[in-house]
Image (tube, rainbow, N blue to C red):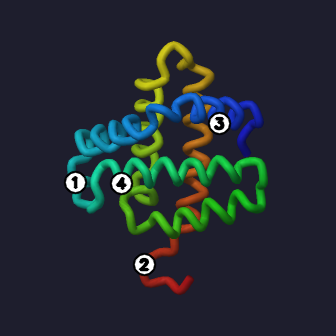
Amino acid sequence: MLAVKQISLVRNDFRRLAPVRPEMFKRFYERLFEIAPHTRDLYSESLTEEAIRVNGLLEIAFLSLDHPQAMFATLHTLGRDFSGFGIWETQSDLVVDLLVEVFAEFGGEDWGTELEKAWHSVLSFIAQGMKEGVVPKGAIA
């Protein structure tokens, strides 16, 4: 389970970064496609649309972090909803690491080891909850 302090650090940082989030998430996809070019074909939307989608995913996930019952239901639903949009369920470690890298890039002087660890923990937790919600192909939901 996540520590209250980790959740607070991440939420505050996410709010602080609100003005640059569209650019930040576009940068995430640019880095993803540099590191794993094969992933580009998984995304049919523009980078702007993908950036909006990831921003919305994180906003929804953060809203539910204080409410364990709702949180798992929300993450499982997000996992099912996003399973068709790319690599969350198959390469979540890469996604988490790249998101943390991009948050650090845009974090400025407020970025530090404690915030990096908090982001990594929260994003890993979200990714795991989403993976648990993905129904394998051919399975009955």
Residue 137 is marked as 2
Q: CA distance from mark 2 to mark 3?
A: 34 Å
x, y (%) of residue 104?
Answer: 46, 25
Q: Amino acid at mark 2?
A: Lys
Residue 38 is marked as 1
Q: Which residue is mark 3?
A: 11
Q: Earlier in the sequence, mark 4 or mark 3?
A: 3
Q: Residues within 10 Å of mark 2 (few under 14, many from 20)?
A: few
x, y (%) of residue 21?
Answer: 45, 37
- Relative placement, left or right, of 71 versus 118 is right
**In front: mark 4 or mark 1?**
4
**In front: mark 2 or mark 4?**
4
x, y (%) of residue 99?
Answer: 44, 38
Q: Nearer the viewer, residue 46 or 116?
A: 46
Q: Earlier in the sequence, mark 2 or mark 4?
A: 4
Q: CA distance from mark 4 to mark 1?
A: 19 Å
Residue that protrudes farthest toward the front in the picture: 19
- Relative placement, left or right, of 16 versus 50 is right
- Relative placement, left or right, of 60 versus 17 is right
Q: Earlier in the sequence, mark 3 or mark 1?
A: 3
Q: Secondary structure at mark 3?
A: helix
Q: Residue at x 47, y 30 (%)?
A: 103
Q: Which residue is mark 4?
A: 49
Q: Residue at x 22, y 54 (%)?
A: 38
Q: Nearer the viewer, residue 64 or 76?
A: 64
